[in-house]
Amino acid sequence: MPKGGKKGGHKGRARQYTSPEEIDAQLQAEKQKAREEEEEQEEGGSGASGEPKKKEKSLDSDESEEEEGEDYQPKHKGVEGMIDIENPNRAVQTAKKVTQLDLEGPKRIRGGRRVEIEKQKAKERYMKMHLAGKTEQAKADLARLAIIRKQREEAAKKKEEERRAKDDAAMAGKRMQSLSLNK
């Protein structure tokens, strides 16, 4: 058995949850209090004439809340009013309709995918330059090809000369035979 004699120990207390109705009532009270303060400031703090107006406003509080709605901003104490802070986590995200989506605009791409696309584009650029003969490797390849072409042309000439020489020798041999047979 843990210290304290009860299951769960001595730490912590019973949790109390506020109902939505209580929260709404607190918000309405705060709004009404803020309105009263604004009226006092507008009227210059006159005591007797300000009282009836406050009561009239409280009777029509439901209607005025609907009209003001989200426009209400409580007064800030100290420096809070001077500094405009916006919490991005509090912003209400609205759902967009399919017709409102911008499909042709720039798209956000995550890091890994972006690197992959950049590599592919760089490779395509290199291949274009390579085919145009502007890269060092392409220049070296073209020089090698030129050397190989010269070698092949020389080999083809040599072969042609050897073939002609054989043909001439064969023709000379046939002439000799034909001359020797005729005698």
Image: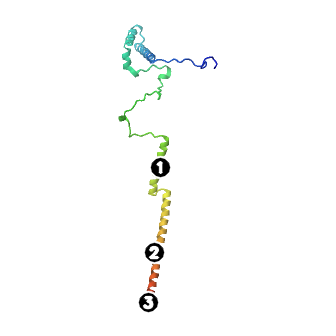
Q: How is the image coloured?
A: rainbow
Identify residue type, mark 2. Glu
Question: Residue at the spot x=45%, y=87% of the render?
Answer: 177
The local crowd at label 3, few if under 14, some if 14 to 19, many if 20 or more residues have their Cα within 10 Å, is: few
Q: 61 left or right of 155?
A: left
Query: Closest to the observer: 64 or 21?
Result: 21
Query: Closest to the observer: 64 or 48?
Result: 64
The local crowd at label 1, few if under 14, some if 14 to 19, many if 20 or more residues have their Cα within 10 Å, is: few
Give whichever of discs 2 and 1 has the lower sequence position: 1
Cα gap from disc 2 to disc 3, whole angstroms: 31 Å
Asked if 44 appears above or below 99 in the picture, the reply is above
Identify residue type, mark 1. Ala
Return the x and y of residue 68 as percentages of the image width and height. 38, 20
Identify residue type, mark 3. Leu
Check disc 3 and report the residue beneath it. 181
The mark closer to the camera, 2 or 3, is: 3
Asked if 1 appears above or below 138 in the picture, the reply is above
Check disc 1 and report the residue beneath it. 122
Of helix, strand and loop, which one carries label 1?
A: helix
Cβ atoms at labels 2 and 1 below 8 Å apart: no
Cα gap from disc 2 to disc 1, whole angstroms: 47 Å
Check disc 2 and report the residue beneath it. 160
Farthest residue toward the bottom?
A: 183
Name the quadrant containing residue 131.
bottom left
The quarter of the picture where the N terminus appears is top right
Name the quadrant containing residue 74.
top left
